[in-house]
Image: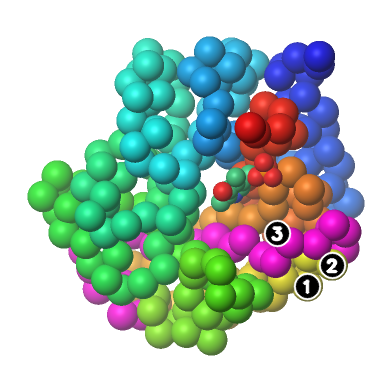
Amino acid sequence: METISRRLERIRHKIAEAAIRSGRNPDAVKIVGVTKTVSPDRISEAVTAGLRILGENYIQESLAKIDALSSRDISWHFIGRLQSNKAKFAIRHFDLIHSVHSEKLATEINRQAAKNSRIQPVLIQVNTGQEATKSGVSPGDAVDLITRISGLENISVRGLMTMPPFFDAPENVRPFFRNTADLKKKIEDAGIDNVSMTELSMGMTGDYEAAVEEGATLVRIGTAIFGDRP
Ligand SMILES: *Cc1c(COP(=O)(O)O)cnc(C)c1O
């Protein structure tokens, strides 16, 4: 089987090509290695190969791994659905929470962050396809949500995250990426205090090249690095 190092090298190359095709700087795109179900040994191999940002979906599953890999230089991101009652763990262990979708969750993250004397960077998850099965604020409500939480002093909004509807062909996902990039621009232009729209988290194994062409700064990739999940 192909090594993780070789896979990462190929992904980096494809990201760079996609960035250049669309007139972007390849360095503006970072890989978030998605490690749900992946063992610390395999994660360690990826870190040795240069992966620096790891994304976890479940608080419970992530805590043991974060502990096991505490000697490594890793920035952990939380990318799953976060329940308010787990916010205290998220703010202790994750440098960026990609999945804030409501004022209630933001308020709890803010409260826990204040208790720990820190300012928690977050992304707002947008439900671009308005799918019932997916979490995220509706695109039409995003400006309002961000305006309301911008006054929370221990949260820093850094951008948007999206998980568009699934299609076999990445080209069909492209309009959803583009809409999310347009929404990010609209929020930037609104100039809301305490909000910096620098990050755009979108694109997974099947469609990250299209996402990069449409402006992604963080691509969340699991399968292409670690292989199929059980
Ligand atoms: C699992 C997951 C990914 C990675 O998906 P792959 O198709 O394996 O690359 C990305 N983002 C989120 C939110 C996920 O849950």
Looking at the image, is mark 1 or mark 2 nearer the viewer?
Answer: 2
Q: CA distance from mark 3 to mark 1?
A: 12 Å
Q: Which residue is mark 2?
A: 172
Mark 1–mark 2 contact, CB under 8 Å? yes
Q: Which residue is mark 3?
A: 215
Residue sitting at x 80%, y 62%: 167
Residue sitting at x 37%, y 55%: 82
Tell me where residue 174 appears, x and y as whole percent: 80, 66
Chain part drawn in magenta: 147-171
- Which image quadrant is residue 50 in? top right
Q: Is the residue marked by circle 1 packed among few (<14), some (14-19), or many (20+) residues within 10 Å?
A: some
- Using the image, determine if residue 102 lies above or below residue 161: below
Tell me where residue 86 appears, x and y as whole percent: 26, 50
Tell me where residue 73 appears, x and y as whole percent: 44, 20
Look at label 3 and name its amino acid. Answer: Gly
- Secondary structure beneath dot 3 equals loop
Which disc, if any, is residue 93?
A: none
Q: Which residue is mark 1?
A: 175
Q: CA distance from mark 2 to mark 3?
A: 16 Å
Looking at the image, is mark 2 or mark 3 nearer the viewer?
Answer: 2
Tell me where residue 138 appears, x and y as whole percent: 52, 80
